[in-house]
């Protein structure tokens, strides 16, 4: 009996050790690229989008690596016309989504080399979208998403789910209105893997506005709800980060979280969203501090916001991932700014929202660089910067 108890205790302690052993593989973006956007598929394959070339007019590339490999497959250029990508500002970079049965979806703000589009009475910079058919060797030709709402500034986002829905999301204006208080978040949704999209509709609460040169992030949560995190601008100094959610048949979306920030400037911030088991996760910047929070299926926050200790040089551009144990890896940049690189920092949080490991840091984030993180099938994490 004593030996049995000893054996059970050993198994229990080994389980605790395994549970606490989440590690982070830290790598640079392959091919000398910047602004990585990584997602893990159901089979553990890591899909990666990155930018390369002139920051004002470069190219986007897609690659992937199998869960059992550390080697990336030869990259595929996303944009059909060379030089139509944009990286300046770090808030306007391309975003990646994984859809049904292996469809790959990408959306990005066009550069000065991209063909202008007519929106209302003005020629404007396009928000471009392209998709890669499963097992195809090249992306389909990109198409412009702006039809009614233009004024693109802080880039766009997109989301896809396992049912074939794809949502392209951005903040902009209609007509001749000027000023951030008149901006709104718009969504075009497809139900056939990005083949045909509905006309865009405003989904943000009336009067919320949108911080013009701040990024936006979208995601499909369980149950088909579209979640969006963006910085509002009800007044010049009122720039609260909002997490909103809803479906296109019931507008506007509901506010799930409001994180106030009084600042008479555009902080040029970005945010991130991740999907867990029956819960979703959002991360954003407020007053130079990164915060993250969990949300239930009904949109209600679960617990309180969590945050790492404040570091040096300001915390910006968060990225988060959640593993099968509910542990959260939060990463961000430090010291980055306009035409200035910096470092990357990260910390693992337990499923209680409390830090389980100290903050780690590494220099080398390039100018206009970002960080991206994913959870592997074995519960470990991958960080790309």
Image (cartoon, rainbow, N blue to C red):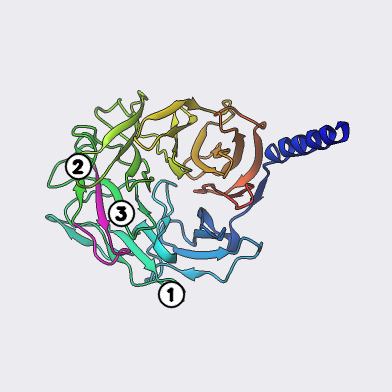
Tell me the residue that label 3 is attached to: 168
Is 340 on the left or on the right of 97, as rendered? right
Tell me the residue that label 2 is attached to: 250
Q: Is residue 191 magenta?
A: yes
Of the numbered discs 1 and 2, the one sitting upstream in the chain is 1
Tell me the residue that label 1 is attached to: 138
Query: As rendered, which of 223 and 75 lies closer to the eye?
Result: 223
Q: Under tag 1, what secondary structure?
A: loop
In the image, residue 246 lies at what x, y percent? 28, 41
Q: Under tag 2, what secondary structure?
A: loop
Is 14 on the left or on the right of 141, as rendered? right
Q: Which residues are magenta?
A: 185-198
Q: Residue at x 56, y 61 (%)?
A: 45
Residue 371 to residue 113: above or below: above
Of the numbered discs 3 and 2, the one sitting upstream in the chain is 3
Of badges 1 and 2, the one in the foreground is 2
* C-alpha span from label 3 to label 2: 17 Å
Of badges 3 and 2, the one in the foreground is 2
Q: Under tag 3, what secondary structure?
A: strand
* C-alpha span from label 3 to label 1: 21 Å
Query: As rendered, which of 232 and 110 lies closer to the eye?
Result: 232
């Amino acid at each position: 009996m004593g030996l049995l108890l000893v054996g059970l205790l050993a198994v229990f302690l080994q389980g605790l050790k395994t549970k606490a052993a989440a590690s982070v593989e830290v790598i640079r973006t392959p091919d000398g690229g910047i602004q990585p956007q990584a997602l893990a598929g159901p089979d553990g394959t890591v899909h990666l989008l990155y930018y390369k070339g002139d920051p004002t007019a470069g190219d986007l590339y897609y690659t992937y690596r199998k869960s059992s490999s550390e080697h990336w497959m030869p990259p595929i250029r996303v944009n059909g016309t060379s030089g139509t990508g944009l990286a300046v500002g770090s808030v306007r970079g391309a975003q990646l989504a994984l859809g049904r049965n292996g469809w790959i979806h990408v959306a990005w703000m066009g550069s000065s080399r991209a063909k202008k589009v007519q929106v209302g009475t003005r020629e404007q910079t396009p928000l471009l979208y392209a998709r890669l058919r499963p097992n195809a060797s090249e992306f389909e030709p990109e198409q412009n998403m702006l039809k009614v709402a233009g004024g693109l500034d802080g880039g766009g986002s997109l989301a896809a789910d396992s049912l074939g829905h794809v949502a392209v999301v951005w903040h902009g204006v209609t007509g001749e209105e000027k000023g951030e208080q008149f901006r709104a978040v718009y969504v075009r949704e497809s139900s056939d893997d990005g083949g045909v999209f509905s006309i865009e509709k405003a989904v943000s609460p009336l009067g919320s506005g949108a911080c013009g040169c701040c990024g936006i992030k979208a995601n499909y949560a369980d149950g088909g709800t579209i979640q969006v995190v963006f910085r509002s601008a009800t007044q010049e100094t009122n720039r609260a980060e909002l997490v909103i959610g809803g479906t296109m048949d019931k507008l506007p979306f509901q506010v799930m979280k409001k994180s106030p920030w009084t600042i008479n400037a555009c902080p040029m911030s970005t945010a991130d969203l991740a999907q867990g088991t029956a819960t979703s996760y959002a991360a954003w910047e407020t007053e130079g501090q990164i915060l993250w929070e969990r949300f239930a299926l009904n949109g209600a926050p679960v617990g309180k916001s969590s945050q790492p200790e404040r570091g040096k040089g300001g915390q910006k551009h968060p990225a988060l991932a959640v593993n099968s144990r509910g542990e959260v890896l939060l990463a961000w940049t430090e010291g980055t700014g306009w035409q200035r690189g910096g470092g990357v920092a990260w910390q693992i949080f337990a499923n209680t929202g409390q830090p389980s490991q100290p903050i780690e840091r590494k220099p080398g984030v390039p100018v206009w660089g970002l960080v991206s993180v994913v959870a592997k099938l074995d519960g470990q994490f991958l960080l790309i910067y």
